[in-house]
Image (cartoon, rainbow, N blue to C red):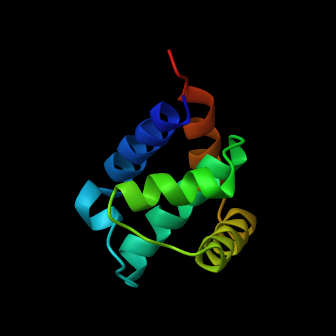
Amino acid sequence: MKRIIFEKYVDKVCSIYGISREKLFTRSRVAHVNEPRYLLYYLCLNRGMRMCELMDLLEQNGLKVFNTSIYHGLKMVDKMRLMDRDMRDMLNEIELTTSIV
């Protein structure tokens, strides 16, 4: 079930940011790739996914990350949420419109 939610979040994040799945799962440190990746971390963990589940799903898609990288991404999303109302609205909409059905 977590895989289904993960895949839906990947599709939504890629669609919103206009990037490919392949780009999302690269080790790129460019902001236009980092931000959507961090958003994916945030959405998955906020949904109740365990850190190890997220790390496994990322690795299955070709991206090996450590928990420190994920924590950094979460901290960045928290900062963006505080400073950017559009980011808050986008996160809320994604969370409200994503279901497993």
Left or right of 30 on screen, residue 96:
right
Question: Residue at horizontal 61%, vertical 72%?
Answer: 73
Residue at the extreme top of the image, as rendered = 101
- As rendered, which of 37 and 6 lies closer to the eye? 6
Residue 59 lies in quadrant: bottom left
Q: Position of residue 27 (x, y in %)?
A: 36, 79
- Tell me residue 49's x, y (percent): 66, 45
Q: Is residue 8 above or below residue 70?
A: above
Is residue 16 placed above or below 96 in the rendered structure? Answer: below
Q: How many numbered circles does the render carry?
A: 0
Position of 1 compared to 58: left or right?
A: right
- Left or right: 57 with respect to 62? right
Between residue 62 and residue 100, name the one nearer to us. Answer: 62
Residue in the image at 28% along x and 55% along y = 21
User: Quick check: can you spot residue 19?
Assistant: no
For image coordinates 44% across by 58% down, the residue present is 58
Q: Position of residue 13 (x, y in %)?
A: 42, 50
Q: Position of residue 57 (x, y in %)?
A: 46, 52
Q: Residue at x 37, y 73 (%)?
A: 32
Please tell me whether residue 35 is drawn above or below residue 99 in the rendered image: below
Instruction: Decide if residue 40 is on the left or right side of residue 61.
Output: right
Q: Which quadrant of the rendered structure holds the N terminus?
A: top right
Q: Is residue 28 visible?
A: yes
